[in-house]
Amino acid sequence: MQLAQRLNSFAEPQTIKMAKLGRELRAKGANIVDLSLGEPDFQTPKHIRDAAIAAVNEGYNKYTPVAGTPELLEAISIKLKRDNNLDYAPNEIIVSTGAKQSLANAVLCLVDPGDEVLIPTPFWVTYGAQVQLAGGVVKLLDCFIDTDFKLTPAQLEAAITPKTKLFMFSSPCNPTGSVYTRDELAALVEVFKRHPQVNIISDEIYEYINFIGGHESIAQFTDIRDRVIVINGMSKGFAMTGWRIGYMAGPRELVQACDKLQAQFTSGANIIAQRASIVALLSDLGPTHEMVAAYRQRRDYVTGALQQMPGVKANTPGGAFYAFPHIRPFFGKRFENYVITNDEEMSMYLLNEGHVSTVCGSAFGNPNCIRLSTATSMDNLREAMDRIGNALGKLS
């Protein structure tokens, strides 16, 4: 069978690959601490689960409108105004089967073959693959730990060309946990104002997992609002990864285009999950705040442990549930048959020698780092930090 050439334009996500390798070792009897996948380890709050059960018992079992049920669209509109002071009418919002589909919808509806898409590094692994599927040209803008992995206005200005169609970023960021302040966003907006052909996708899926104060959305700046696409969803802030509900808010013209595209792929998202999402968005956020407090404790412990390891450099994430330590000083070192020459070999070494599953930083656009998920218990994190410290200590 001859498969389509488009499959050659991107690779399997390293996050999925490392999780698979960890499961294979575990099946052979190894005790693996998995820090590879970004999935909350908390149960979905009970009031949300109860809402889903009620929806089943009340007979919600039919197709929904492609863009989402009117009740959920209204709930998202209320949430955006309540939490972000953003005014989006229900017809400026579309619900999809996860925020990943929301991103894919937007990219496929905006990017033509040959269009440039600017992506600051480090970035979530799927951004580049989605652009490549659309035939776009990925243009990476390197950001480093010394600037907390944030893009400067000068870098942005220098990268924009007449072919630039789209800019994609996340705040809080996966994989670094970096969070843009209002002033930092305002400085980027000044650049965007000079380049009206550039649209902006703002991935805000980690909005609630924020350790530095209120979330700031680039959509708040009215001068560029008609070019901003806000992506969010239920997965991270409500521990609803498997429920697969994401949403996009943006210009009505784009929302209509995404509705047309989605109608040919998945139609409307799961109705039971949509009913539960209404309750999640409009109910007390106490359970979310409790989860965030636990993530903060984990962040503090892991960051402190990494910063104590000789040769490791780690920033203090402002949000999300990851650490992205700089491990380049270990390149060229060895232990027994292991020789570390790059980040992928470091991740494999930590998996095979330390029995800790991580993800190489090059998957996110930075080959000097590795990503660790802190979405697991403190006991697991303590064990993982001990194992990583011991494994790194063997390299010379």
Image: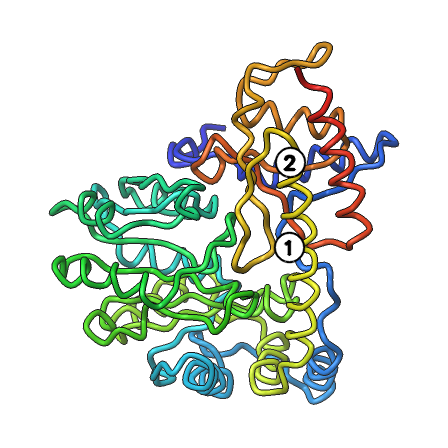
Q: Position of residue 357 (x, y in %)?
A: 69, 37
**Image quadrant where residue 140 sits:** top left
Is 20 placed above or below 154 here? above
Helix, strand or loop status at disc 2: helix
Q: Position of residue 356 (x, y in %)?
A: 73, 36
Task: In the rendered structure, find residue 378 and report the number of the disc placed on it.
Answer: none
Left-right relation of 56 to 226:
right
Reading the image, the residue beneath label 2 is 18
The type of residue carrying mark 2 is Met
Name the N-terminal-most of marks 2 and 1: 2
Left-right relation of 205 to 58:
left
- 167 or 396, which lies in front? 396
Residue at figure coordinates x 72%, y 75% from the top left: 45
- 66 or 293, which lies in front? 293
Whether pointer 2 and pointer 1 mark residues with C-beta atoms closer than 8 Å, the reply is: no
The type of residue carrying mark 1 is Arg
Q: Is disc 1 surrounded by few (<14), some (14 to 19) or many (20+) residues within 10 Å?
A: many
Task: In the rendered structure, find residue 299 and report the number of the disc placed on it.
Answer: 1
Q: Position of residue 348 (x, y in %)?
A: 65, 26
Q: From mark 2 to mark 1, how far is it between C-alphas?
A: 22 Å
**Number of numbered labels in the structure image:** 2
**Image quadrant where residue 3 sits:** top left
- 228 or 369, which lies in front? 369
Q: Which callout, 2 or 1, points to the residue nearer the camera? A: 1
Outermost residue to the top: 337
